[in-house]
Image: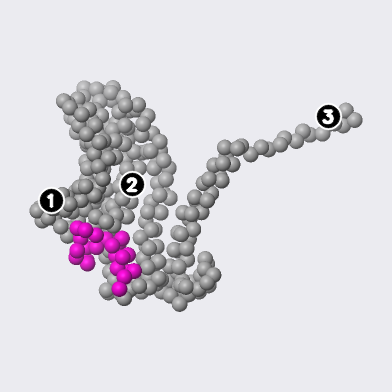
Amino acid sequence: MAASALSRPSRRRWKFPKETLIFWLVLTPLAIAVILPLFYMTAMAFTPEQDQLVWPIQWIPQHPTAINFQHIFSDATLPVARWFMNSVLVASVGMLIVLFLSSLSAYAFARLEFPGRSAIFSLLLVSLMIPGAVTLIPSFLLLRDLQLLDTYHAIWWPGAASVGGIFLLRQHFFAIPKDLEDAANVDGAGRFRIYWQICLPLVRSAMIALAIFTFLGFWNDLFWPLIVLSDRANLTLPIGLLVLSQGSYIQRGLAFAGAFIGSAPPLVFYAVFQRQIIQGITTAGLAGR
């Protein structure tokens, strides 16, 4: 009996870690709460108008069709394609402006010595606590006096100084060894060349993360463009989606199709660059300053 007992292979009991179980129990409902509306929006975008209010909900359309998208892109009174390109232009140019100005400012705060550097940076951080509603009217009046209303400059320049982006990139610039700059100085490189060719490539992950967050911020912004834009041809896609849900265009199929068009680029961006986003965020404080 002892020999047979020893000859049996020992069975290991697989234990599910308690922390992992809690992790799944908490995040699974949250994931469902996020994915379910997106799945419903996609299903309704490809559902005919007469089946929009069918109960129970058709999570997989019984008669899938692209008629809602055809209606949107063929209706001359609904320039969705133009609104889409307007959003691409606003988000792309705004992203480039924020990246350039934020990286320049972050490099100056991290690598240059000048009087009041710490005080100015502390003042910038304090400005993060000021609600946007406080500066809404002064910004609008300033843009009016500069005759920038109903132009994309009214969207780009108020958000060009990103304090969050400056803080993120400053932490990464701090982590760059000083010896690299000293070697470049010996070789005759100027300050801007050191910033552009040496330091900027070393913070690539943070730049990509900031670029995606900034692009999505401009892309999804509704409140400020709704205030400063008035010409129908200059509207961005979020404002255009309001047009789809008002007046004579109150059709669920068109509204869901427009929402699908507006949601697709951010989802694709995150799916492609999610590793860079996570890496840029997790390494933001490694410099320790």
Please give the name of the residue rendered at 50% of the width and 73% of the height, measured from the top-left corner: 54
Q: Where residue 6 is drawn, which disc sits there?
A: 3
Label 2, on which residue? 213
Please tell me which residue lies in front, 186 or 58. 58
Q: Residues within 10 Å of mark 2 (few under 14, many from 20)?
A: some
Mark before the other along the chain sequence, 3 or 2 = 3
Q: Left or right: where does residue 184 sit relative to residue 56?
A: left
Membership of 238 in magenta stretch? yes
Q: Amino acid at mark 1?
A: Leu
Amino acid, disc 3: Leu
- In the rendered view, would you say 45 is above or below 95? below
Which of the marked residues, 1 or 2, is nearer the chain's N terminus? Answer: 1
- The C terminus lies in quadrant: top left
**Residue 82 at what x, y percent from top left?**
27, 65
* The image quarter in which residue 66 lies: bottom left
Q: Residue at x 28, y 69 (%)?
A: 79
Residue at 31% x, 76% y: name it: 248
- Residue 198 is situated, as x and y percent measured from the top left of the image, at 27, 32
